[in-house]
Image (cartoon, helix red, strand yellow):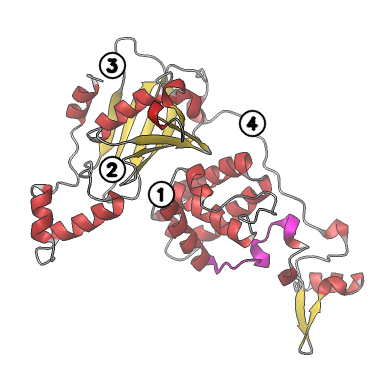
Amino acid sequence: MPDADRLRAITELIRAVCAEHLTDEYGALAVAAAEAMAGVRGDPLARYKAEGWAAGIVRAVGQVNFLSDPSSDPAMPLDDLAALFGVSKATASARHHDVRNALDLVQMDPHWTLPSQLLDNPMAWMLVVNGLPVDVRDLPLDLQRVLADEGHVPFAPADPAARPPTPRWPEPTEEPDDFVGLDPEAPRLQLTVTLDDVEPPVWRTLTVPSDLPLDGLHEVLQVAMGWSNGHLHTFESGRRAWGPPHLADHTDDERATTVGQVLRTRASRLVYTYDLGDDWRHTVRLETRLLPDPDGPLAVCLDGAGACPPEDCGGPWGYADLQAALADPTHPEHREMLAWAGGPLDLHAFDLAATNRALADV
C-alpha cells in the first residue's frame, strides 16, 4: 500500500512550487503523475526524500511538455527545478529518471501533455487507417465525436465545448493545523535540517529566533551538524541566493535577511550549502512556530540522528566511497582510507546534550 502521508507531502510540495513558479495546470498534471507513481509496484515513493520526488516528477512532466524551450510559456531550464525544491541537480535528475522509467514517459506523450497544449500535440490525434496515418483534426466533427466516444482520441478537437478546462487549485480555506492561533511573526521557529544525499540519514531539529539573520543561522548549523566552519557557504531559496559579504558578486548579503523572512510556511524550503567544492547541501524546513522562552538560549537542538561526515572527503558521493572502503578489509583503498579517517567511523554517533552545550556558546 502506498504511504498516504508521503504522497501528501510530495503533492503539497508540487502544489506550492508550481503555483509560485509555473502554473496551476503544471501542478495538477504533476500531482496526477505523483499519484500514478504511488500506484507503481513496490511503492517507490517510500524511498528517498519527498523533495527529491517532487522535483523529479515536475521535471519529468516538464520534459514531456518542453518546459526548457524558451518559446514555451512558462519556460524554465529543467536544472532550475532542483533549487526550487531544495535538492541537488543530481537528486532531481535521478528521481526524474525513475519517474520516466516507471511511467514510460516520452516527449509529447498525449497522456502527460498539458491540457492547454493537447490540441497542438500531433501524437494525440494521429490514427492509422488502412495503413495510412490520418490526423483526426482534419476529419468531420461527427466522426471526431465518434472516435472520442470510442476512446481513440482525448476529445473531439473541432468542438470547443469538448476541450478539457485548465485546472485551477482551490484557494486554501484555513491555516495549516500547527500554525492555527499563532502569530505569523512568532518569535521562534522550529526547523528540521536534513543533510541531502547521504546514508545513513543525518538530520537535526532546531529552534531559533525568527529574526535570526542568515549569517547567524550559518553559525548555528555549523555547530548543530558538526562542521568545522572551514569552508565557504551559501543559502538558496527559489531563485534567490545569499552568502557572506565577500560573495556579493554572486549572492545577496546574508546579514540583511532573517530566517523568518525566508521560511514563512511549511512549504518553504531553504537550502544551505557548505563547502562549495564538496557541495554538502542541507534542506531546512519550517515545522512550526513557537512561543518565546525568554530565559532560553539562542538556539536549541530538540532531536537529531546521524554523525557529521568527515570534511574534505569529496561530498556525498565521496562519503559513500569512503564508507565502502572502510567497511571492506579487502578493498584496495581500505588501509589508506582507514589512516586518512583516523580509524573506523561511527556513522550513527550523535550526542544531543553535547550539541546543546556547544550551541549555548553560539
Question: Residue 224 at what x, y percent from top left?
Answer: 26, 31
Q: Residue at x 17, y 41 (%)?
A: 349
For residue 215, above or below residue 228: above
Which residue is under mark 3?
A: 297
Q: Are marks 3 and 4 in contact (CB under 8 Å)?
A: no
Element under disc 2: loop
How far apart in space, not on screen, are marks 2 and 4 (Cα)? 35 Å
Q: Check residue 60 in the rendering and tell me which mark sits there, or answer none.
A: none
Front residue of this view, candidates 70 and 222: 70
Which residue is under mark 4?
A: 173
Question: Can you say which quadrant of the picture contains the C terminus?
Answer: top left
Q: Residue at x 13, y 55 (%)?
A: 337
The image quarter containing residue 122 is: bottom right
**Kind of residue sitting beneath label 3:** Pro
> Within 10 Å of the Cα at label 2, are there few (<14), some (14-19), or many (20+) other Cα atoms?
many
**Kind of residue sitting beneath label 1:** Lys
Q: Horizontally, is 119 left or right of 40 in the view?
A: right
Question: Residue 165 at what x, y percent from top left?
Answer: 77, 52
**Kind of residue sitting beneath label 4:** Thr
Q: Residue at x 29, y 14 (%)?
A: 296
How far apart in space, not on screen, are marks 3 and 4 (Cα)? 36 Å
For residue 104, above or below residue 73: below
Nearest to N terminus: mark 3 or mark 1:
1
State which mark lies toward you, 2 or 4: 2
Q: Residue at x 90, y 69 (%)?
A: 141
Which residue is under mark 2?
A: 202
Question: Can you say which quadrant of the picture contains the N terminus?
Answer: bottom left
